[in-house]
Image (cartoon, grey):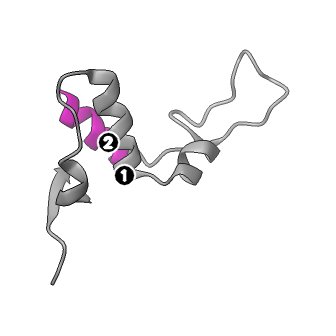
Amino acid sequence: MALAQVDLGYGVWANADNLQYVSRQDVTKTTYTLCEVLFTKEQLAASSLTGRQSNAFQNISAKQKLDENKVRAIIGKLL
């Protein structure tokens, strides 16, 4: 039996079972949960939203940018 997939837009699909845990009452919790659904913990730890060098920590190299389509899909679910 195939898992039901939901189109979040921008070519991003997510497992419908995982989306049932997304809270719509708190934007912070909603964002966090959507990130957990679309990215692995390793991806989140090794990436940044923009992929640019930090002004505050210039001695640390820039992290890889998160997948733009997944970020757009998360923003689309928040609006």
Res. 10 in view? no
User: Where is 72 relative to 3, above or below?
Assistant: above
Q: Is residue 19 left or right of residue 62?
A: left
Bounds of the magenta segment: 70-79
Residue 6 lies, with reference to residue 54, above or below; the image says below
In the picture, measured across the screen, residue 17 lies left or right of residue 62, that is left
Q: Helix, strand, or loop for circle 1?
A: helix
Residue beneath the point at 71% across and 17% down: 55
- For the N terminus, the image quarter is bottom left
Tell whether position 9 is magenta: no
Q: Which residue is mark 1?
A: 38
Q: Residue at x 16, y 56 (%)?
A: 7
Residue in view at x 34 percent, y 39 percent? 33
The span from disc 2 to disc 1 (Cα, nearest Å) is: 6 Å
Q: Amino acid at mark 2?
A: Leu
Magenta residues, dominant SS class: helix
The residue to which callout 2 is attached is: 34
In this rendering, does residue 18 appear at all? yes
The local secondary structure at tag 2 comes to: helix
Residue 23 spot, x, y in % from top left? 21, 33
Residue 1 sits above or below residue 14 on the image: below
Q: Residues within 10 Å of mark 2 (few under 14, many from 20)?
A: many
Q: Residues within 10 Å of mark 1 (few under 14, many from 20)?
A: many
Image mark for residue 67: none
Seen from this angle, which residue lies furthest top?
Answer: 56
Q: Nearer the viewer, residue 22 or 52?
A: 22
Asked if marks 2 and 1 touch (Cβ < 8 Å), the reply is yes
Q: Quadrant of the C terminus?
A: top left
Q: Residue at x 69, y 29 (%)?
A: 53
